[in-house]
């Protein structure tokens, strides 16, 4: 039997009032929606990463587009393809979307050579999110390695903007060398304005580096954690998950209070291409955010 999929009408009042939800599998029309957008501004971060400020062109669609910390979008470059990218911006801002993109392939290479004004397409947002509401009243550990600070930036925005809702907030960040540090222009704001405990470490220091040297797990030696009332979010290369999460478990933090993002497994965002599956679990539908207990029960997830 053929199923008719009616076109999505942005002008319908009911659609305008309803919150955008692209995570319901039985709502295929919004999932297929491609927002026409353009690159409004580009901020160089490192030799390999740039921060793209993407603006949805239609004013009504721009106001309706919302996301939660941890979700991702599919970014299309017409004629070259599309890629999944975690949203690195402020969830409370609806004027534009911020995406931190590393130059690593054809599509990202085209993006890195693009100029402001270039047209792109946005689908999403997709996936699960970090349960920030569950963390209210507790200590929060925000831990990132390398490019992992990009998806962690959205929960950092949420925590700092709702700072009275959380107790002690620790931001732990590690990279291979100082040249790979992302968003360094925001560090003082996190510390001074919002009272976060920010600790940074690099593995290979240069001549001008005066901070700590070593692996990111070394930063845990200087923080006090109440294991019965602490939540942790971990973002970064999968190889670091076991070391970080096992260290947190040894400190007494329950596995179900440790959250990781498997955004690097994302592909189509809708569970159609089957390239993100781990056993019978589709990461783009069941994730990318999982608690560590679930991850440990997903064979070969990390």
Image: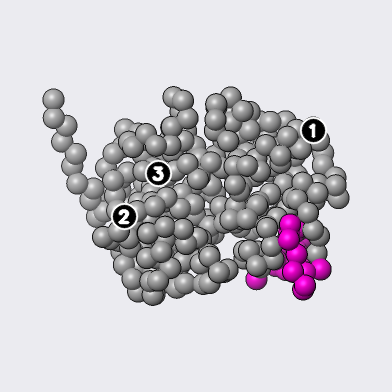
Quadrant location of the C terminus in the rendered image: top right
Nearer-N-terminus badge (1/2): 2
Which secondary structure, mark 1? helix
In this view, the residue farthest toward the left is 1
| Residue 250, numbered circle | 1
> 133 or 12, which lies in front?
133
Spatial CA span between label 2 and label 3? 12 Å
The quadrant holding residue 131 is top right
Which secondary structure, mark 2? strand
Can you identify the residue that label 3 sits on?
267
Tell me if label 1 and label 2 are in contact, CB under 8 Å.
no
- Residue neighbourhood size for the residue with mark 3, other residues' Cα within 10 Å, grouped as few (<14), some (14–19), many (≥20): many
Which secondary structure, mark 3? loop
Q: Is residue 23 above or below residue 159?
A: above
Left or right, 147 with reference to 63 = right
Q: Nearer the viewer, mark 1 or mark 2?
A: 2
Quadrant location of the N terminus in the rendered image: top left
The quadrant holding residue 272 is top left
Q: Residue at x 61, y 28 (%)?
A: 296
């Amino acid at each position: 039997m053929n199923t008719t999929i009616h076109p999505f009408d942005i002008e319908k009042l009911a659609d305008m009032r309803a919150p955008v939800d692209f995570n319901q599998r039985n709502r295929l029309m919004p999932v297929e929606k491609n927002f026409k957008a353009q690159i409004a501004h580009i901020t160089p971060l490192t030799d390999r990463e740039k921060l793209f400020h993407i603006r949805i062109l239609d004013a009504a669609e721009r106001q309706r587009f919302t996301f939660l910390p941890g979700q991702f979008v599919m970014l299309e470059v017409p004629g070259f393809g599309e890629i999944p990218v975690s949203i690195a911006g402020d969830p409370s801002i609806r004027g534009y979307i911020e995406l931190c993109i590393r130059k690593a392939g054809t599509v990202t290479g085209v993006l890195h050579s693009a100029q402001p004004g270039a047209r792109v397409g946005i689908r999403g947002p997709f996936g699960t999110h970090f349960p920030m509401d569950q963390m209210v009243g507790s200590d929060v550990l925000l831990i990132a390695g390398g490019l992992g600070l990009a998806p962690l930036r959205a929960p950092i925005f949420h925590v700092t903007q709702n700072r009275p809702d959380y107790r002690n907030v620790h931001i732990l960040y590690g990279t291979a060398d100082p040249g790979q540090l992302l968003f360094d222009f925001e560090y003082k704001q996190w510390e001074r304005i919002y009272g976060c405990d920010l600790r940074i470490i690099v593995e290979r220091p240069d001549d001008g580096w005066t901070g700590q040297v070593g692996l990111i797990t070394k930063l845990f030696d200087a923080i006090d954690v109440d294991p019965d009332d602490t939540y942790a979010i971990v973002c970064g290369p999968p190889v670091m998950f076991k070391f970080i999460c096992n260290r947190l478990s040894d400190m007494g933090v329950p596995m179900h209070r440790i959250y990781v993002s498997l955004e690097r497994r994302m592909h189509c965002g809708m569970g159609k291409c089957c390239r993100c599956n781990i056993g019978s679990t589709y990461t783009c539908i069941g994730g990318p955010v999982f608690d560590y207990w679930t991850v440990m029960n997903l064979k070969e997830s990390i």
